[in-house]
Image: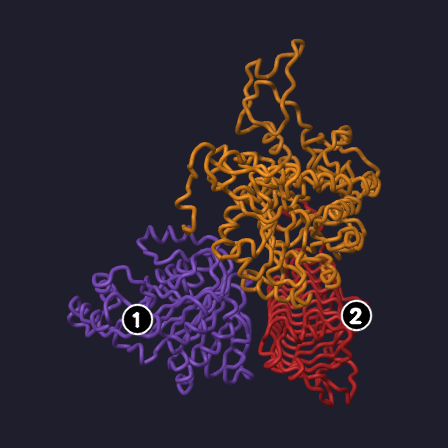
Chain colours: A orange, B red, C purple
Amino acid sequence: MPTDLGTGLPPHCTALPRAASRPIPQIPEENSMTITDYSPAAPATPQAPPTPAQSGLRESATFDRATIADIQRAASTGIYDIRGWGAKRRLPHFDDLLFLGASMSRYPLEGYRERCNTAVVLGDRHASKPLHLDIPITIAGMSFGALSGQAKEALGTGASAVGTSTTTGDGGMTSEERGHSKTLVYQYLPSRYGMNPDDLRRADAIEVVLGQGAKPGGGGMLLGQKITERVAAMRTLPVGIDQRSACRHPDWTGPDDLEIKIGELREITDWEKPVYVKVGASRPYYDTALAVKSGADVVVVDGMQGGTAATQQVFIENVGIPTLAAIPEAVRALRDLGMHRKVQLIVSGGIRTGADVAKAMALGADAVAIGTAALIALGDNDPRYQAEYEALGSTAGFYDDFQDGRDPAGISTQDPALSSRLDPVEGGRRIANYLRVLTMEAQTIARACGKSDLRHLEPDDLVALTVEAAAMAKVPLAGTTWIPGAPSSTGVVV
Amino acid sequence: MTAVVQSTAVADPTGTVRGTGPVTATSTATVVDLAATSVRELNAALHDQADPTRNWIITHPAGRHNIAVGIDRDVTLRVDGHVGYFFAGMHQKGEVTVHGNAGQGLAENIMSGRVHVTGDASQSAAATGHGGLVVVEGNASARCGISMKGVDIVVGGNVGHMSAFMAQAGRMVVCGDAGENLGDSVYEARLYVRGQVASLGSDCVEKPMRQEHLAELAELLVSAGRDEDPADFRRYGSARTLYHFHSDNADAY
Amino acid sequence: MCGIAALQITNPALRPQLGSLLNTMLCEVIERGPDSAGIAVYDNPALTDPDTTVLSLLGGEQALSPAGLASALERELPEAEVTVEVLGDTTFVSGQASSTELTAALETVLPGRDIIGRGRHVAVMKGVGNPRDVAEHHGLTSMTGTRGVAHTRMATESAVTAAGSHPFSVADDLCLVHNGSFSNHATIRRDLERQGVVFDSDNDSEVAARYLATRLTAGEELESALEHLGTVFDGFYTLVVTTRDGMAVVRDPISCKPAVVAVTDDWVAMASEFRALADLPGIDHAHVFEPEPGRVYTWRA
């Protein structure tokens, strides 16, 4: 059973074994036949007992140990596994792309001296006050409730320090959050928890959320452990219940109604604020085109690696498409409508490094958003909490029980004792540092490709390492001119 | 708006609508003709906190969308005719009345004040409303009060299917009948229905009508200008069996 | 995603106004579907005659002149007395033959034409661009008739083409328009194709039209066929179906897409938004309601 942290949680919070019922990951055997979730094995010492493989035992690739544990967990609890984080399965990703760089045919810019612009304007199609960001890396929507107040503060101060935006989440806007974020995007979600016209007016942009990459077609979820009195009051819910958010907006369905809804939001805010439309990546060509037709200023496409605070694992791992596959389709829709760069595209889902930023932008994004990476920068999965992760049935590097409210790092929790572990000032500094590194890394690559602006990166700067990535990103396999599927993947509706 | 706005003395800016509260018998109203003025201009004027106009009359709405959204001051506004989607969306403070029908999402996310429709309201009336009072004298169709979060809703006629779906807080009074699946997944909202209920949704049950319920219902009916007898109503609310995930509830998920 | 306006006139005195009333309704739902539009008008003596089959062809200009097309068709069907008329972006081919015979002859003479309407009562017109212009090109306001349906389209998962516009008229005097999107249409399309049904477009709504036509052709009543459709098709939809003698409206069991119906002794009308009904004569005394989920409503002329 989980360690009682003395958090004063309601008794039901321990009624359903979640994290505790999941196995503590073990280091795989050296000759294991299966690809597992686990980190590389330490070499077996001569004194070690024979491994299962050495004993002639063979692990099933289909029923590997994680699968067996999942089945056992399901059989013992009778309810599906709910967890945080995004898809953990291996997917074609930015790692499968490489930049070509300049040499003879193209000239690079001086890496430390010559200008490479990172600033971007978002939402100048209809809004009288578009956002002017210094860097094209924004903080994705994460709610107060899913995250502690300290975590939200750190994200706000860190992002503001480097001139970029943060985003609210499914639960409304707090005054602290507004205060700490120079540029704040207010999410307009199906649940409308805490939806308030005063907050709408004091936001810098409005993001109409249709879905997120971790769960396109699904609603939000916040389990009772995190529904404290303040969170409950913000969402008008009884304290301690398992909150299940709606997956569809309550007063409109479809792009014909969305056009009217966007009109309403613009009218209420006197046409000042940019209106974003965020979709989970599933059919990005159609979704992007329809968002544009509905009047969006900015389209946000979140790939399936995008994180969540709590969703069914089966959903996270099996619904949606990888970020890599989503970007070219969204860009194709914008180009077909003559709106690329006029309606800006923000891409999220698995952005970790400046190389990822540069690759997303080379594929046609105007900006990116980070979520999980920002939490890691704040201290999520830090090895210094190893003992506590183990007590929760996890380990550093594997912890994904953001739904559980017992985050040792004080990030995905509402417990005062835990959240006080996160120093928001230090956290803000770490976020600013991380964002600066991402920006400088992206600039380094852009200059090497001869670009004086991150948005001058283009698909032609990229090649793919795998056939899958080449097909999805629609760039050639390295050393060839071959883009698998190219003739039928441009504009032909099947 | 200069050319088409005129100030006019009106005997009773709120007409004969019941229960709209006290009105000044000789108040002056600004008349805005939407055949000549855009909704955008109207809304901008309504948002202007420096504008001293308290009484507004809107003519020729012609079912346009987003009329009078985002009001945040103490105005009295009357619309002569039918309005489209999201009329009085996110309304605060003022009192607005439509002499006609209202389209989808009437007074969605209303915070305070009062929105009154003499005719029918389309689906999702008062959706996610946090406070205030929404009165529909005629029928309200599907999903009336969906995800309501504290608003009071009084419907003179019937409500459609899935009304009070996921209703979190507030009160809904239906003087006529309720369609299928009333109060599905209701949280702490209280529902009062005078006529037939076609069926109750998941986790919605009939509850005893105690004295305090009769009293609050009587107050709601009076504030909506209605004369039904609270004793003729039945009360519905959450059985609270779906508040926590449990495998025994799998049929309801 | 779309706007729908449909009107069936029961009082013969109002029939000369069908086109102008329908045009007014259409103009109120343009914003819901600015990409393209389609219109069907029943029993307009200028376009249809109960003794003659009319095919509505996409395009006002064909490879043959109207007279050339008529004589070419008469060579194929010597008894048919074919006439060809062009109105706006539509060519109407009439002849005393069945629609199957006329279609076969047309395929011989002008292969690969988009036939957007067929029957002895209905004329169908479609076009890309602002729906107001599509109506104007075809002179809708001056048309008389018994019933009509107009549709404005914002394409969701298929191309913006005139052929992809609604209504879908895939059997004699049957028209279907749709607002919403089906979520299992591809499987139903494959099932129908296996039965030999041929499709004209990649549109999900055409699948519903073909499904309905298949059942009606097999002798099923419209109400029953629509009820079956509701058990087979998944997704969000408001459908309006018109036939030579009536009109039907049905919404899916969740009913998110809008629909408002108004009924008087003189007419029955349905639209995506009330404002499209607001100028109909006698609307103040009409019975106005929003169709209940999953329930089939039919009105016979």
Q: Kindly indicate the quadrant of the structure image that contains residue A9.
A: top right
Structural crowding at the residue carrying mark 1, measured as other residues with C-alpha within 10 Å and reported as few (<14), some (14–19) or many (≥20): many
Q: Kindly indicate the quadrant of the structure image that contains residue C242.
A: bottom left
Nearer mark to the viewer, of 2 and 1:
1
Position of the C terminus of chain C, as image quadrant, is bottom left
Question: Is residue B54 left or right of A216 when viewed as pictured?
Answer: right
Query: What is the chain identity of the residue bearing mark 2?
Result: B
Q: Residue A267: percent from the left, percent from the top?
A: 66, 68
Question: Is residue C133 left or right of B50 when viewed as pictured?
Answer: left
Q: Is residue A242 visible?
A: yes
Q: Residue A246: percent from the left, percent from the top?
A: 64, 54
Dot 2 amino acid type: Glu
Q: Which mark is residue B216?
A: 2
Dot 1 amino acid type: Thr
Q: Which mark is residue B84?
A: none
Q: Residue A206: percent from the left, percent from the top?
A: 67, 58
Query: What is the chain identity of the residue bearing mark 1?
Result: C
- Give C170 or A320, whichever is nearer the viewer: A320
Q: Secondary structure at mark 2?
A: helix
Q: Is residue B241 visible?
A: no
Q: Which residue is mark 1?
A: C91
- Give B80 or B236, whichever is nearer the viewer: B80
